[in-house]
Image: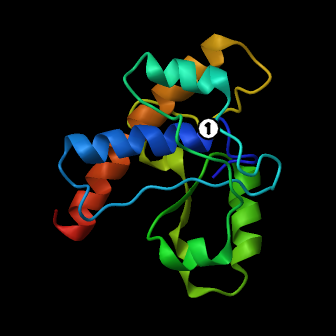
């Protein structure tokens, strides 16, 4: 989850969907993305995010911005925030739900990056989108390994 669901979170959705397909897990693993704010409802991902992802064989064009819901927190086993602000927004949204322990930072699954947060590339240039992709790809590999361990896939 990110703020507006047009840069980081749709990138993560696209990266993770590609990994799930490559590992033949499409039958049991679902990826979706959302924002914690309603800034860009029904909008496609930022064109810079789409371009950077396309260079790596990832198509984000069908993803549309949406706002996260409490149902997402109940329905998904992993709720992954890109930064502390979105993490806290999600905890607030979860309230007293028992599923709030499923809320984590995406980079907790990273092997290569020491940062805790995926930076928002929105106000930067192309290099920012490439760095975000590097971080998300690494964390997504760690996430997939965790899912395989957790569910014996």
Q: Position of residue 46 (x, y in %)?
A: 68, 29
Q: Position of residue 86 (x, y in %)?
A: 72, 54
19 relative position to 88: left or right: left
Q: How is the image coloured?
A: rainbow
Q: Position of residue 1 (x, y in %)?
A: 63, 52
- What residue sits 40% from the left and 34% below the top? 138
Q: How many marks?
A: 1
Q: Confirm whether residue 61 shows in the render.
A: yes
Which one is nearer the viewer's eye here, 143 or 11?
11
- What residue sits 48% from the left and 35% below the top? 136
Residue 53 drawn above or below residue 95: above
102 relative position to 39: left or right: left
Residue 55 drawn above or below residue 66: above
Residue 69 drawn above or below residue 122: below
Q: Quadrant of residue 15?
A: top left
Which one is nearer the viewer's eye here, 117 or 33?
33
Residue linked to disc 1? 8
Q: Secondary structure at mark 1?
A: helix
Which one is nearer the viewer's eye here, 81 or 65?
65
Residue 117 drawn above or below residue 145: above
């Amino acid at each position: 989850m990110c703020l507006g669901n047009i840069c980081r979170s749709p990138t993560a959705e696209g990266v993770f969907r590609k990994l799930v397909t490559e590992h033949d897990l499409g039958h049991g693993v679902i990826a979706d993305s959302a924002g914690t704010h309603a800034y860009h409802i029904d909008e496609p991902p930022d064109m810079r995010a789409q371009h950077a992802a396309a260079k790596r064989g990832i198509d984000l064009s069908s993803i549309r911005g949406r706002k996260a819901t409490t149902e997402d927190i109940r329905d998904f086993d992993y709720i992954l925030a890109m930064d502390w602000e979105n993490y806290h927004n999600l905890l607030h949204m979860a309230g007293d739900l028992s599923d709030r322990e499923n809320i984590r930072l995406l980079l907790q699954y990273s092997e290569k990056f020491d940062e805790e947060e995926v930076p928002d590339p929105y106000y930067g240039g192309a290099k920012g989108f490439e760095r975000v992709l590097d971080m998300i790809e690494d964390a997504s590999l760690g996430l997939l390994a965790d899912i395989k361990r957790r569910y014996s896939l």
